[in-house]
Image: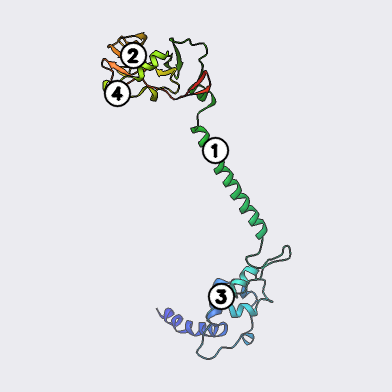
Amino acid sequence: MALRRVVATFLPKIAQPVTETIGPAASHASVCYPQLLAYPLEFAERPQLPIGSSFRSFAADAVAAQKETKLTPTNRISLSPTPYIKYDEHSHKRFPPGTEGRPFAYFVQTGGRFLYASAARLAVLKIVLSLSAAADTMAISSLEVDLSGVEEGTTITVKWRGKPVFIRHRTDAEIQDSAEVALSELRDPQKDVDRAVNPKYLVVVGICTHLGCVPIAGAGNYHGWFCPCHGSHYDISGRIREGPAPYNLEVPEYRFVEEKKILIG
């Protein structure tokens, strides 16, 4: 117990001169920067601070000791911080801010936009071409028929888009009889002149408008077409006159490309 009291009495007096000699900042540096203590500065060489002031960091001692110590550049920068940055420019040239590599950047940016525009154009063309019909499909959609071999008073049947098409070379008497029919007598009123581009040739789709049967040419009560399925009678203009069919035979889109040659579709 007596030994503890002696140590407690004399230990602060021994430690006080050391603290006063090296200063509180140096005491902290002895723990954090042991390399500096290998090259201590004399107390007289240290900057004297006004009475009552204290060290805020160890940078002041570090700046004075740079030439005498063997600290690394990183340690010296950390001990003496500065807002000024110096770049190593011995191997390259520095441009003013905002001007370095600008032509090359413009070239890359323009090239990228050109590639994007080309890709967008190609995508649009692909979409448009995929929506348009192919050449073989367009060829099937239209049919050219030569009428020079169709004698007057006869009917031929051709296939167009998988459907039968009747082409009748009508006589003058048949044309006159079709024109004299009153519209009040017709279930689906249509004039004969509205159903034939050329009165001599009547072109109609050979499908009954009732349930889709194929009528027989030159039969029925009106010498036009007769549907044997349910008894629908069509006249020589393809108009429904008797039976359950609600509409006349359909007239497809066609035109004369020559005097005796038509293009259906």
Q: Amino acid at mark 4?
A: Leu
The residue indicated by pointer 1 is: 125
The residue indicated by pointer 3 is: 29
Q: Of the residues under marks 2 and 1, which one precedes in the sequence?
A: 1
* Label 4 environment density (alpha carbons within 10 Å; few <14, some 14–19, many ≥20): few
| SS at circle 4 | helix
Instruction: Please tell me whether mark 4 or mark 2 is closer to you in this view.
Output: 4
Instruction: Please tell me whether mark 2 or mark 3 is closer to you in this view.
Output: 2
* Label 1 environment density (alpha carbons within 10 Å; few <14, some 14–19, many ≥20): few
Instruction: Please tell me whether mark 3 or mark 1 is closer to you in this view.
Output: 1
Residue 127: horizontal and vertical position, in percent? 50, 36
Q: What whole-number distance in Å separates the C-alpha atoms at marks 4 and 2?
A: 26 Å
Residue 43: horizontal and vertical position, in percent? 61, 85
Front position in the image: 263 or 191: 191
| SS at circle 2 | loop
Q: Of the residues under marks 4 and 3, which one precedes in the sequence?
A: 3
Front position in the image: 235 or 18: 235
Horizontal side, residue 150 vs residue 206: left or right: right
Residue at left offset 52%, top offset 80%: 56
Q: Quadrant of residue 228?
A: top left
Above or below, comparing residue 75 to residue 166 in the picture:
below
| SS at circle 1 | helix
Q: Of the residues under marks 4 and 2, which one precedes in the sequence?
A: 4
Q: What whole-number distance in Å separates the C-alpha atoms at marks 4 and 3?
A: 119 Å
Q: Amino acid at mark 2?
A: Cys
Residue at left offset 63%, top offset 50%: 111
The residue indicated by pointer 2 is: 213
Tags 4 and 3 touching, CB below 8 Å: no
Which dot marks residue 239? none
Q: Amino acid at mark 1?
A: Leu
